[in-house]
Image: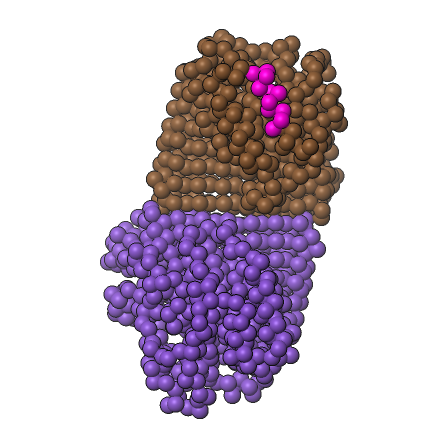
Chain colours: A purple, B brown
């Protein structure tokens, strides 16, 4: 791949969580706790129209009635929702004309993260909408996109500028009462990204956002809404890093994708929130609701590389509503030390001739627990539905666990469903073979893990594939021996 | 009064008829307490997500049959495996029928649970094995434990093997408008011993029957158990079958379940591998028609290293039927070198049929080979066409393909006469006469 062995070696040496720094930017933070006033205050701070405030309040009302779910195969201390500050925005927030005006400390943060904004402009061709503690502070390439009629901005901006689109689609795929965390997000979401691709437009570049949790004790409640109008195409990247914190941080995002007739959305995630220390202390709680809706002949493809977070609870799903629509899910979930992941997908086949593919690779090391939980549901009217699922788990060491909970529900006789799962470890003969050819054990393992994950890594856009491969190695470093 | 209240109040009446000073009675008291606390499982529980017991709870079941009933052998002969000689333990409406049975104490004990629970000579075995592997927590199992009094008791001492297979038959005569039965079986196979058992529940009328059965099986070192369950009951009969198996070193236990009949059938099959080099096999063929539901829940708990488990369940679902398969494999941390295999293949032949399947692996050891595969599909149109071009009518061609589909499971049936019988049952269920022996 695009990096040399020396670079990899250097990466491996700095195996501690490398993004564990904390940027000292004055933040405008709301007092801790959650009640109706806080929600009204968030809404007001963001200059939101009345319908949005009401929408948030309705969600909050529903949330109060709900109970935190316990069915997932994860154990953790439940967050105290009254001990979190629900809004934190970097408070020097001018509208920048050029990069020079940006807070230098913030620029420094980006540098450490490896997102050099100006460089990306030229080299990667990626427009980055950087979300740092909830408020979008830098948006690039907006002009190029605007020429094509593509709207790519923060959701709060979209609420102000394009209320008709937001109003029409928000909450249609993930209703505000969908589940405990989605309701919480609907009530308090601070910011996020909004993307609209007009009819027949093929987005010329990969759209991407980077999320970071920065301010201590603040939860991050992102809301992403991607709408691909008829016949359009977009590839969207999302990457996450968060600084080290002892206290557990909550991340409850909602992502909604809408692919109208003949549209295609490719959504890729590299998630690398702080996984907690070696002793299982700290780490991010990642409770995310991601769901996409496919109309006729539409396609949604989820690709995710999950290496971070102390607790992950995430099921990117596809509702295949239109005939001939396609849903895909490619996932690599790596857990090490005391990490716990319960992740998978739901493929709901409603339309005729719908197809779905699920490829899930779980790698557990250390004392971690890794679960795949998925649902394939074929509705009685979904004639000729086709599903292929494959869940493979790789175990490293005998203190970790790998679990699979695939639910398959078929109500149509023309359905064709295949499901396969395997669990294994890295074979001694494989390592021996590598050793024989002068590859040391550590590298051999990296090699084998990469091969194991290849089917999924191949689905990532180039920029991400390199990063993801490095992440895999760093996450598993020190887990074998 | 709902069924739960009725059962709890019946327990007091039940106590008047059993020896309350017997140590087993404390076990019953514990069990009824657990059932009282938990009640019948609801769809909210993960294990009962797809199967509802609500409608059964509305039926006014009589818990104890009022009178003894007799049956003529010629009337029920067809339910026996009469082609070969077998030991028989026969119950009519839950009461032992000595007339239809053939038991033995010649070297092995093939007799009754009621005798084992009351006679001092069996006390030692009861102390060691009774209610030891059955769940003390699962509500329906504890309900059975609370009312445990009658059933089959099979004890095969070291190095023995009974001369012939054992049949356990439960008939319901329909003398009661609706009857609830709770048989309790205990099978103990000592070192190097072997046994073959065929179990069948049969209702003879259209009256409602609910059977909540618990079977405990213990296989000591090198013990071999072959257990065949034939579930081809009347459309008004429901069965909840709880089987718990405890295996020691190098033992082999195979359970085959053939589910063709009944209204609601729930099989909870639990294997616990308490030793090394154990082989556990569970296979099933399910063919369902109108409004039937069969729910297979299997559990294999690999506790020690170097063991194997094989699961193979085939299902064919027609009309309004519902099939559920939930196969759980747990591999403990120390159970290295485990080889666990699970397969579940299903064919839906009707638009109204539903299949819910959930294979589940929970693995804590790294040096293991575990896999599960699950498919839902249809008969191969091309194969069907091929057979038709050779002059085989469509219906027969379909049946032939379904046979082939289920054949893997039948291949391991070790009693040839039983295999023939099951083939006939399958042909019957598919509504064809193939005119040759498969």
Residue A79, given in percent of the width and then of the height, sits at: 44, 59
Q: Name the residue nearer the viewer: A285 or B433.
A: A285
**x 66%, y 49%: residue:** A411
Magenta-highlighted residues = B8-18
Q: Name the residue nearer the viewer: A161 or B164.
A: A161
Q: Is residue A21 visible?
A: yes
Task: Give the side of residue B186 with respect to residue B367, left or right.
Answer: right
Q: Is residue A380 above or below residue A228?
A: above
**x 44%, y 56%: residue:** A78
Residue A33, given in percent of the width and then of the height, sits at: 47, 67
Q: Name the residue nearer the viewer: A151 or A148.
A: A151
Q: Is residue A291 visible?
A: no
Q: What's the magenta bit mostly, secondary-structure-wise? A: helix
Task: Give the side of residue A476 with respect to residue B408, left or right.
Answer: left
Answer whether residue B12 is magenta in the image.
yes
Residue B55: name its quadrant.
Answer: top right
Direction top: furthest residue? B106
**x 67%, y 39%: residue:** B54
Q: Is residue B45 above or below residue B75?
A: below
Residue B137, given in percent of the width and then of the height, sits at: 50, 34
**x 65%, y 29%: residue:** B6
Residue B124: name its quadrant.
Answer: top left
Looking at the rendering, in which quadrant would you find the N terminus of chain A? bottom left
Q: Is residue B133 above or below residue B319?
A: above
Residue A192, given in percent of the width and then of the height, sits at: 50, 74
Answer whether residue B218 is magenta in the image.
no
Number of disc labels? 0
């Amino acid at each position: 791949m695009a990096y040399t062995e020396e670079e990899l070696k250097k990466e491996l040496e700095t195996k501690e969580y490398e993004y564990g720094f904390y940027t000292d930017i004055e933040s405008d933070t709301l007092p801790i706790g959650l009640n109706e006033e806080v929600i009204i205050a968030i809404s007001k701070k963001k200059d939101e129209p009345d319908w949005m405030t009401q929408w948030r309040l309705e969600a909050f009302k529903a949330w109060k009635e709900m109970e935190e779910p316990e069915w997932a195969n994860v154990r953790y201390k439940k967050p105290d929702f009254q001990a979190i500050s629900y809004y934190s925005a970097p408070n020097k927030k001018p509208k920048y004309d050029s990069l020079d005006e940006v807070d230098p400390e913030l620029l420094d943060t980006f540098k450490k993260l490896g997102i050099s904004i100006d460089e990306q402009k030229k080299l990667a061709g990626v427009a980055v909408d950087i979300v740092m503690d909830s408020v979008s502070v830098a948006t690039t390439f907006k002009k190029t996109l605007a020429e094509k009629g593509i709207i790519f901005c923060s959701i709060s901006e979209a609420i102000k500028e394009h209320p008709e689109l937001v109003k029409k689609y928000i909450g249609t795929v993930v209703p505000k009462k969908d589940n405990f965390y989605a309701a919480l997000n609907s009530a308090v979401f601070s910011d996020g990204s909004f993307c609209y691709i007009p009819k027949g437009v093929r987005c010329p570049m990969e759209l991407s956002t980077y999320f970071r949790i920065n301010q201590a004790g603040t939860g991050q409640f992102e809301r992403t809404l991607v709408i691909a109008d008829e016949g359009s195409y977009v590839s969207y990247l999302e990457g996450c890093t968060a600084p080290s914190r002892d206290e557990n941080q909550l991340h409850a995002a909602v992502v909604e994708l809408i692919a109208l007739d003949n549209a295609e959305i490719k959504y890729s995630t590299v998630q690398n929130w702080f996984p907690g220390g070696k002793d299982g202390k700290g780490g991010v709680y990642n409770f995310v609701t991601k769901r996409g809706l496919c109309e006729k002949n539409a396609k949604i493809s989820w690709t995710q590389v999950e290496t971070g977070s102390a607790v992950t609870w995430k099921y990117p799903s596809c509702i295949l509503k239109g005939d001939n629509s396609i849903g895909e899910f490619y996932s690599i979930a790596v857990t090490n030390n005391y990490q716990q992941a319960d992740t998978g997908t739901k493929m709901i086949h409603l339309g005729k001739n719908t197809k779905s593919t699920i490829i899930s690779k779980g790698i557990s090391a250390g004392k971690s627990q890794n679960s795949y939980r998925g649902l394939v549901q074929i509705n009685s009217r979904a004639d000729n539905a086709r599903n292929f699922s494959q869940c493979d788990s790789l175990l490293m060491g005998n203190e970790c666990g790998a679990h699979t909970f695939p639910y398959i529900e078929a109500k149509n006789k023309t359905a064709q469903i295949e499901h396969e799962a395997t669990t294994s470890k890295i074979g001694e003969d494989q390592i021996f073979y590598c050793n024989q050819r002068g590859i040391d054990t550590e590298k051999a393992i990296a090699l084998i893990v990469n091969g194991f994950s290849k089917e999924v890594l191949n689905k990532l856009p180039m920029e991400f594939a390199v990063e993801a491969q490095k992440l895999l190695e760093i996450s598993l470093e020190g887990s074998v021996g | 009064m709902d069924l739960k209240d009725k059962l709890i109040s019946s327990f007091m009446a039940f106590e008047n008829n059993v020896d309350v000073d017997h140590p087993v009675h404390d076990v019953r008291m514990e069990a009824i307490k657990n059932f009282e606390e938990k009640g019948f499982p609801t769809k909210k529980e993960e294990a009962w997500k797809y199967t509802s017991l609500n409608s059964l709870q509305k039926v006014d079941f009589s818990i104890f049959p009022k009178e003894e009933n007799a049956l003529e052998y010629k009337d029920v002969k067809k339910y026996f495996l009469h082609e070969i000689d077998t030991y028989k333990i026969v119950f009519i409406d839950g009461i032992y029928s000595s007339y239809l049975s053939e038991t033995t104490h010649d070297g092995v004990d093939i007799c009754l649970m009621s005798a084992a629970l009351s006679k001092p000579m069996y006390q030692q075995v009861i102390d060691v094995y009774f209610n030891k592997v059955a769940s003390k927590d699962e509500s329906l199992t504890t309900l059975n434990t609370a009312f445990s009094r009658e059933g089959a008791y099979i004890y095969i001492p070291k190095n023995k093997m009974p001369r012939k297979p054992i049949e356990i038959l439960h008939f319901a005569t329909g003398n009661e408008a609706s009857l609830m039965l709770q048989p309790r079986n205990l099978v103990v196979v000592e070192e190097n011993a072997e046994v073959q058992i065929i179990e069948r529940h049969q209702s003879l009328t259209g009256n409602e029957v609910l059977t909540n059965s618990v079977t405990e099986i213990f296989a000591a070192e090198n013990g071999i158990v072959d257990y065949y369950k034939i579930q081809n009951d009347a459309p008004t009969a429901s069965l909840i079958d709880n089987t718990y198996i405890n295996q020691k070193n190098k033992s082999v236990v195979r359970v085959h379940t053939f589910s063709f009949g009944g209204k609601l059938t729930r099989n909870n099959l639990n294997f616990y591998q308490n030793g090394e080099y154990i082989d556990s096999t569970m296979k099933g063929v399910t063919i369902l028609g109108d409004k039937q539901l069969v729910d297979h829940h299997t559990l294999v708990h690999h506790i020690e290293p170097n063991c194997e488990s094989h699961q193979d369940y085939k299902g064919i679902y027609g009309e309004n039927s519902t099939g559920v398969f939930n196969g759980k494999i747990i591999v403990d941390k120390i159970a290295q070198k485990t080889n666990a295999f699970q397969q579940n293949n299903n064919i839906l032949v009707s638009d109204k049929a539903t299949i819910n399947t959930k294979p589940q692996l929970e693995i804590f050891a790294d040096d293991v080979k575990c896999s599960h595969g699950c498919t839902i599909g249809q008969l191969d149109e091309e194969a069907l066409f091929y057979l038709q071009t050779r002059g085989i009518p469509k219906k027969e061609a379909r049946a032939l393909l379904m046979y082939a589909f289920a054949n893997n499971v039948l291949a391991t049936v070790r009693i040839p006469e039983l295999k023939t019988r099951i083939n006939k049952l399958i042909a019957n269920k598919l509504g064809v006469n193939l005119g040759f022996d498969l």
